[in-house]
Amino acid sequence: MSVALHSRAPAFRETPTGRALGRFLGNRPAVAGFVVLAVLVGTILLGPTLLGLSPNAIDLLALNKPPSAKHWLGTDGVGRDVFARLLEGGRISLSVAIGAVSISLVIGFLMGALAAFGGKLVDAVIMRIVDLAMTLPPIVLLLVLASITGPGIGPTILVIALLSWPILARLARARLLELRERDFVLAARNMGAGTWHLVLRHGLPNTLDVLVVYATLQIANAVLLEAGLSFLGLGVPPPDASWGNMLNGARSVLVLEQFPWQWLTPGAALVVTVMATNFVGDGLRDAFDPRSDIG
Amino acid sequence: MGLYILRRIGMGCVMLVALSMLVFALLRLAPGDPVDAYIDPSAPMSPAELAATRARLGLDQPIPVQYLAWMKQVLAGDLGYSLQRNHEPVARLIAERVGPTLLLMGSGLLVAIVIGVSAGILAGVNRGRVIDVGLSLPAFVGISSPAFLTALVGLFVFSVNLGWAPSGGMRTPGLAPTTGDLLRHLALPALLLSIGHAALIMRYMRASLIEVLNQDYVRTARSKGVRERWVIVKHAVRNALLPVVTLIGSTLGAAVGGAIFIESVFNWPGMGLMLINAVENRDYPVIMASTLVVGACVLAANILTDLAYAVVDPRIKIA
């Protein structure tokens, strides 16, 4: 019995990635979060085809109707199907979040590299900017930037990206500073490698793991920021659906009181997504932390 | 110690200057002519007067000179005029709004600290038991819910369905302002504002307490026969509270964000509601001035937290 158990364990534990995978799979909330996310993304991607209802199709015979057999989650004020819009909203909300975090990954890595390799002055300036951006209320900065760009999917992605890079830059800088002194980087440098080569060939691959882990947590954050902006009518504008702008309807007292299915469902979807993403992110962080095997 | 305080304050000043530069840069990035913010609508201007105002404001000067001139004005309390709201001076608008926001945030923070710390202690002491799970699960939901959603659900449940609290505003219109009326209006938004923060504080308190309970000095205290309740209160909690103090300071920025949404949902007449209205109307002087004021307050609060931490924990040194 113990032989069977042991023969499986080493398969996971031979490589650092295998060990990380083993740790991740041993983390129940993280696995649960991953399953929930997988189901959610699957539904968002496949649902519209199976449902066969357009998120913008108007059923004038069903305005503000509660959930029924035809409209599973009811309809909104102009007779659009809430479930179809929920799926469409999920697609847009998640795309905005993933797009924004991808951009902020690039900015964060480049800023971190600039800080690590650009000399003391550049480092000090960038790090003060990062400190400032991490201290200030993110929502205030978000509102200010949004007031300059105006609403729209593109501007929303940009604004969230501009807000999310500082923590990634700090992580990248810390890792790159450490790498800079490693023998293989010194060797490359002595063989005449330029800074670009060092950053992209040696820095990037060795920084990617920590960046990807924190990017996962940033996605949860980005989903919340998008929802907040759209809730205030400054993010994704209608007729496109997003979970935030579906919640925007609840700013009207009538919708809040009389038609709770119109705003409770995107709200629930939002919380479930953010929670699942946070669990996965926490799980990844612990899994990739080499110290977690000791504790 | 003295050196630490000096350096921390110096760093804070650098950040303040950086903040002012950021706000100034955004002000220039914003669409529209900055001179608009200084036109008094009751006295329309001719092109010659406009040019004169421009020269007086130094808008014909190079950018760094403009920045210094702007800083001088800000320090003298001149934050320009609102583009909406009858072109009132922004400084006066902000002065009216600071009180309600401080009241809401202060009470929210107080409730959050009380709930968060006590729930954290309960969960940490009963680690892995039903109480721990029963408290940790709602905390996860609390952390993952945006403030505006908490506000909407709270409004829906307590105000619309149960009718326990008024649905918004700071006072009942038409009634003489009394403390009781104010408290009735304050209770629900402050409680809802505290949820997210309380959840965060609770998780931190729990983790910190669990770590401290594994320390040697706690074992020593137990083995010399100190009563368990006393061990927890005197030895463990006091030490576990230290990192929580820093957390409260460093998450203040996020709490401000939550307050903005709560103010919007509950129509609370504070800085957040003003900022949101200003953003909707593209009222740049108000947007920039509120950003500057809110940012400066958060930075100042951060410095104070760090200093308080240095006083409580003599081991601390600047990084």
Image (cartoon, rainbow, N blue to C red):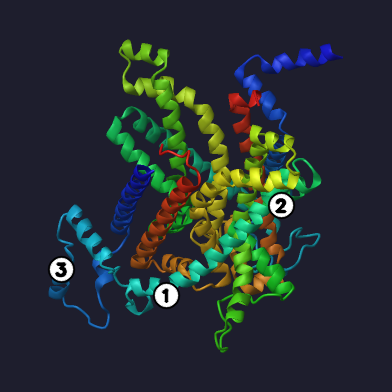
The amino acid pointed to by label 2 is Pro
The amino acid pointed to by label 3 is Arg
Mark 1 nearby-residue class (10 Å; few <14, some 14–19, many ≥20): some
User: Is B82 situated left or right of B116 in this image?
Assistant: left
Report in which chain the residue with disc 1 lies: B
Whether labels 1 and 3 share one chain: yes
User: Is A231 situated left or right of A145 in this image?
Assistant: right
Residue at image position (63%, 27%) is A292
Q: Residue furthest front?
A: B224
Report in which chain the residue with disc 2 lies: B
Q: Disc 1, disc 2: CB below 8 Å? A: no
Q: Which residue is mark 1?
A: B96
The amino acid pointed to by label 1 is Glu
Mark on residue B244? none
Q: Which residue is mark 3?
A: B56
SS class of the residue under badge 1? Answer: helix
Residue at image position (32%, 75%) is B89
Quadrant for residue B68, please give it.
bottom left
- Quadrant, the N terminus of chain A: top right
SS class of the residue under badge 2? Answer: helix
Q: Which residue is mark 2?
A: B138
SS class of the residue under badge 3? Answer: helix
Quadrant for residue A148, please give it.
bottom left
Of residues B178 and B270, the one drawn nearer to the viewer in this rendering? B178
Badge nearest the viewer, 2 or 3: 2
**Residue B41 x, y percent position in the rendering:** 27, 80
Of residues B300 and A258, the one drawn nearer to the viewer in this rendering? B300
